[in-house]
Image (cartoon, rainbow, N blue to C red):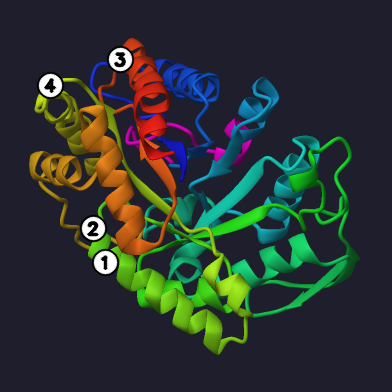
Amino acid sequence: MRIGTFVLAAQFPGQGPGEALHRAVRSAEAAEECGLDSVWLAEHHFVPYGVCPSAATLAALLLGRTRRIRVGTAVSVLPNHHPVALGEQAALLHLTSGGRFSLGVGRGGPWVDLEVFGGGLDAYENGFPEALELLVDWLRKPRVAASGERYGFREVAVVPRADEVLVGADDGAAGAPGPEVVVACTSPRSVRLAALRALPMLLGMHCGDEEKAEMVALWRTAAREAGHPWEVVEGAAHVSAGVAQIADGPGDAAETLVKTMPGWLREGLGAHVTVDGRQRVMRDPVAYTELLCGLHPVGPPRLAADRLAATAERTGITRFALLVEGSGDLAATEENVRRLGQDVVPLLT
């Protein structure tokens, strides 16, 4: 079982972006100090839901400040990036960190980001498969050319090569063929796309165990149909996103989140603007918070450990990215991370 944190740099009502980012950095440093496995960084634009506009940039900072923990993006929104530019950044972080970087990518949403960055709605609706293929090719091959609908260029050398032997890495990372690539999956189409290249999935916090188990089963079927060997299919390290809040009293953790998260969700999610004016239906923030508290490790350490173990048993997923900043408070977030690492993880081993 590998337990990590999921960092949105959430800007709660009454806070500024600097406070949100400071809490994000401190929570990541605390995760290393407490022995957690990984930190996963979200990327958002123009909304207080999350004030980190470049997950790869924040990952670079955290890789420089840490020595052991894995740092990943969850996710870099691929329609807002040129795949080659993102691939170069990923290779750089992979090589300079000794293999501690994971690149999570996703399709994002139909937001105004697409207008600002020039990708347009087509990049969101149709362009993700081509962009993902070019990105993975860049991270796996010595030379790459493109002749697709969105990207076309003559063959060029890949510099630096992400799949070269790492200098100074431990034995486990030294032979790694470039950075891990994880795909955020929300539909059967995206599951099959990830399976085609045997890329592990990141599954969202709104999904219950039954839905995640169905997506893992579909991924395995599609990966086998694509010809991937048994050990690759069975050994895929998918990631389950969730929420973690640890407290001694049976209802204290949920009470903390129900007091703080709805205000953040209401402001943060409500600030999204669609690129084409389509109507949006926003979840009820209180009901959504209560749903998350019922699905994930929210409560005393034993309950939290049992919920993580149950999800692993039902889905086969043993990697977790858990939102720990739901209180909106720096000291409470650091304490939450400490309790996750010191009180919950030992119950899982």
Three-letter amino acid code at the position of disc 2: Gly
The amino acid at mark 4 is: Gly
Residue 281, position as x, y percentages in the image: 15, 57
CA neighbours of label 1 inside 10 A, class few (<14), some (14 to 19), many (20+) = few
Q: Which tag, 3 or 4, sits closer to the chain's start?
A: 4
| Disc 1 target residue | 211
Q: Which mark is residue 249?
A: 4
- Residue corresponding to mark 2: 208
Residue 250's tag is none
Label 3 CA crowd tier, 10 Å (few <14, some 14–19, many 20+): some
Q: Which-is-in-front pick, marks 4 and 1?
A: 4
Name the spot of residue 276 as percent of width and height, x first: 32, 63
- Which dot marks residue 332? 3
Q: Is residue 47 found inside the magenta-colored segment of the image?
A: yes
- Choose the circle earlier in sequence order: 3 or 2: 2
Please report contact status of discs 4 and 2: CB closer than 8 Å, yes or no: no
Q: CA distance from mark 4 to mark 1?
A: 29 Å
Q: Are marks 1 and 2 in contact (CB under 8 Å)?
A: yes
Q: What secondary structure is found at the residue carrying circle 4?
A: loop
Alpha carbon distance from label 4 to label 2: 24 Å
Q: Position of residue 169 (x, y in %)?
A: 81, 38
The residue drawn where x is 61% and y is 71% is: 232
In three-dimensional space, the C-alpha distance between marks 1 and 2, rounded to whole angstroms, equals 6 Å
User: Looking at the image, which residue is at 52% across and 26% down?
Assistant: 35
| Residue 217 on image: x %, y % | 38, 75
**The residue positioned farthest toward the top in the image shown:** 331
Q: Amino acid at mark 3?
A: Ala
